[in-house]
């Protein structure tokens, strides 16, 4: 029972001595954002994630797939999973809500331009076979 009193006093001392460390420092707002809504909007607008997409007027085996968009210290990366193949995109460029990249399918280059709005992507896939509409949604699982 004596030890509980000592433990209580030690905890009280520790907490009272540490309260100044818990104070918000306005000069470091990137660690403690002032507006959580802004942070959530940025995440929500981000192209990073897994996207289920469909393409109109193409052979069935290429009409649906997954886009996986990631970012590391070297930049953005796009992987396309279609027709049991995993393809790594090149020339990946992301500017706010626009994503552009190239991918080679059956030896031909396909240039993709997408726009991200909330959990939806829309855009075009251009190849020597023509221009095709692409649309998709963010996979939340």
Image (tube, rainbow, N blue to C red):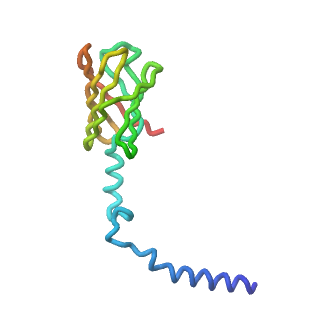
Query: In the rendering, at what x and y percent does residue 79 appear?
Result: 40, 31
Comparing 80 with 1, the one in front is 80
Question: On the image, which quarter does residue 37 sit in?
Answer: bottom left
| Image quarter of the N terminus | bottom right
Q: Is residue 132 above or below residue 28?
A: above
Residue 24, quarter of picture: bottom left
Name the residue: 30% across, 32% down. 91
Q: How many numbered discs, if any? A: 0
Taking the spot 63% from the left edge, 85% from the top edge, the residue there is 9
Depth check: give the residue in front, 131 or 105: 105
**Along the viewing direction, whichever of 113 and 132 lies nearer the viewer:** 113
Q: Residue at x 31, y 56 (%)?
A: 38
Residue 48, image quadrant: top left
Residue at screen point 37% across, 33% down = 78
Lateral position of residue 18 relative to residue 77, left or right: right
Query: Eyeballing the image, is 90 above or below 70?
Result: above
Residue furthest right as drawn = 1
Residue 121 image point, x, y percent: 31, 34
Indicate the position of residue 96 as horizontal and vertical percent values: 26, 44
Residue 10 on image: x %, y %: 62, 83
């Amino acid at each position: 029972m004596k030890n509980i009193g000592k433990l209580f006093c030690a905890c009280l001392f520790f907490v009272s001595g540490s309260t100044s460390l818990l104070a918000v420092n306005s000069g470091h707002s990137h660690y403690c954002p002032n507006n959580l809504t802004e942070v959530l909007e940025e995440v929500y607008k981000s192209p990073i994630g897994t996207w289920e997409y469909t393409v109109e007027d193409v052979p069935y085996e290429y009409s649906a797939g997954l886009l996986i968009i990631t970012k590391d210290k070297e930049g953005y990366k796009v992987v396309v999973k279609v027709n049991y193949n995993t393809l790594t995109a090149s020339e990946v460029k992301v500017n706010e809500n626009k994503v552009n990249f190239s991918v080679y399918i059956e030896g031909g280059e396909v240039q993709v331009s997408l726009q991200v709005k909330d959990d939806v992507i829309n855009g075009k896939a251009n190849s020597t076979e023509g221009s095709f509409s692409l649309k998709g949604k963010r996979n939340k699982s």
